[in-house]
Image (cartoon, grey):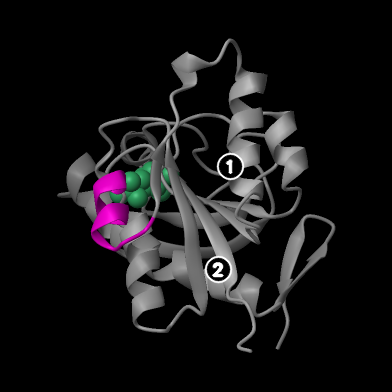
């Protein structure tokens, strides 16, 4: 019997281009994983369309149907655990995850963020990098802990900031790199190539 594939849950809220990059890497066999479930907190997220187009289960879970954050997270955790998922990938997921969720998948949640962390955590970060006058920006894949955009860094890619850039052009240059490093980071995890030393993520040879 073939061994079980490494299973991913992907949490989304919007356009889903990072989800698409993960799907494409799996379809090209550059990533030996399977997406067990895509969950969105936004009904109209295009990411759900993308999931369905590829025959994946795309579920809208409405935060407004739950009395508080904890019960919403309990529902999320149940759905994800029912699929025996190995890794939870946040891909443009716009809700901050609380203690309950993070403890349920401790060390098994990752996120992609469009800046070179620890510079510019939070929102509108391409605009903030431009306004700050940064000459380089980029993206970061990191483990998720309770500090927003604060977990151990797995991979980063750097892009230049040009004088002519506006928020859209810089975002696009960064996004291209996101689509490269996010699947690569997942592949490193599933191939057991990472170890944690304090808050440093070391890459085994
Ligand atoms: C990306 O820029 C990602 O880094 C950030 O949210 C955006 C999501 O884009 N966390 P998409 O939905 O994957 O296209």
Q: Taking 70 as reference, is 9 left or right?
A: left
Frontmost residue, 201 versus 163: 201
Q: Which residue is mark 1?
A: 79
Residue 39 screen position, x and y as percent: 45, 42
Q: To which quarter of the image does residue 162 belong?
A: bottom left
In magenta stretch: residue 55: yes
Q: CA distance from mark 1 to mark 2?
A: 21 Å
Above-or-below relation of 24 to 122? below
Residue sitting at the far front: 1
x 58%, y 76%: residue: 5
Frontmost residue, 45 versus 3: 3
Q: Taking 167 as reference, is 141 left or right?
A: right
Residue 56 screen position, x and y as percent: 37, 58
x 39%, y 37%: residue: 125
Above-or-below relation of 202 to 163? below
Above-or-below relation of 104 to 142? above
Residue sitting at the far right: 198
Residue sitting at the far left: 164
For label 1, being within 8 Å of ligand 1 is answered: no
Secondary structure of the residue carrying numbered label 2: helix
Does residue 177 appear anywhere in the picture? no
Residue contact between numbered discs 1 and 2, judged by CB atoms under 8 Å? no
Q: Which residue is mark 2?
A: 186
Above-or-below relation of 193 to 78? below
The magenta segment is: 47-56
Of the image marks 1 and 2, the number of the one nearer the N terminus: 1
Q: Residues within 10 Å of mark 1 (few under 14, many from 20)?
A: some
């Amino acid at each position: 019997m073939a061994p079980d594939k490494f299973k991913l849950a992907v949490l989304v809220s919007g356009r889903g281009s990072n989800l698409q990059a993960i799907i494409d890497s799996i379809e090209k066999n550059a990533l030996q994983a399977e997406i067990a479930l895509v969950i969105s907190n936004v009904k109209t997220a295009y990411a759900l369309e993308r999931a369905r187009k590829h025959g994946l289960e795309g579920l809208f879970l409405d935060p407004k149907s739950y009395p508080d954050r904890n019960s919403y997270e309990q529902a999320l955790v149940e759905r994800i655990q029912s699929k025996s998922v190995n890794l939870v990938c946040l891909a443009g997921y716009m809700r901050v995850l609380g203690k309950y969720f993070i403890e349920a998948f401790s060390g098994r949640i990752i996120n992609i963020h469009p800046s070179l962390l620890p510079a510019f955590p939070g929102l509108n970060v391409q605009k903030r990098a431009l306004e700050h006058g940064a000459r380089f920006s980029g993206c970061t894949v990191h483990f998720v802990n309770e500090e927003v955009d604060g977990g151990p860094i797995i991979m980063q890619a750097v892009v230049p900031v040009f004088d002519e850039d506006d928020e859209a052009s810089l975002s696009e240059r960064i996004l291209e790199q996101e689509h490269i490093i996010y699947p690569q980071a997942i592949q490193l995890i599933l191939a057991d190539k990472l170890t944690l030393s304090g808050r440093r993520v070391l890459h085994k040879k």
